[in-house]
Amino acid sequence: MLQPVCLENKNYIIHPFRSEDMKRYGKLVKEIFHLLSDDDTLHFLPEKRLRSVSEADAWLQGAILNFHCGRNFIHFITDKVTGKLVGMIDIISPEVAMTNYRLDDYPYFIEFYLAGSARGQKIMSTLLPGVVAELQERNITILGAVVNRRNTAAQKVLARTGFRFRAAFDPVQDLYELSVSEMMPFRQAG
């Protein structure tokens, strides 16, 4: 099973669901609902939309179970000052990718979501290289990402991290890939 990624810089913490998150479980569910019902966050991912707080609760319970079963690995991006959720990074196992995608080979995939209010602050450009470096240390040699062709911000984040266009994925999305030989060295963001 993939070990969780735990990183922080002066502004943000990347972490899996932790024991201290149990103390704020209700707030976290509401923050997840806010994130995954936000029009700006989901502009290119409307299929991820949650319709109610109870859906967010079920989503979080599923994410916790999937993490411990090794299916996919949700990591939260928490603001250190406010303690609020500003985004999430999901690391999807090859086994789960196999059930959702038709490819010749199945690497780990990475998806990320950022609150619309946090756009334009280069948060993902700062944090994603560190996550990739951590995955490299866990012997993950290839990472994939699927991105909407109109989502230029996500494309730029991936390019800055070292991902390269691999192929058209479907009529609206492209497949990007990062192999260990192309991984950029992690620069600690201050």
Image: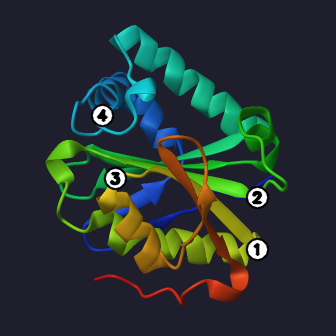
Label 1: which secondary element: loop
What residue sits 37% from the left and 59% below the top? 154
Label 1 to label 4, Cα distance in Å?
30 Å
Q: Which mark is residue 107?
A: 2
The answer to whether mark 1 and mark 4 are in CB contact below 8 A is: no
Tell us which disc is closer to us: 3 or 4.
3
Label 3 to label 2, Cα distance in Å?
22 Å
Tell us which disc is closer to us: 2 or 4.
2
Residue 132 sits above or below residue 31 on the image: below
Q: Mark 4 sits on what residue?
A: 35
Residue 111 versus residue 105: which sits nearer the camera? Answer: 105
Q: Is any atom of residue 70 visible in this view?
A: no
Colouring style: rainbow
Tell us which disc is closer to us: 3 or 1.
3
What residue sits 30% from the left and 34% below the top? 35
Q: Which quadrant holds the C terminus? A: bottom left
Q: Residues within 10 Å of mark 2 (few under 14, many from 20)?
A: many
Please name the amino acid that badge 4 sits on: Leu
Direction from residue 94 to residue 180 in the image, left or right: left
Residue 120 sits above or below residue 19 on the image: below
Q: Position of residue 111 (x, y in %)?
A: 51, 50
Residue 102 versus residue 125: which sits nearer the camera? Answer: 102
Q: Mark 3 sits on what residue?
A: 151
Label 4: which secondary element: helix
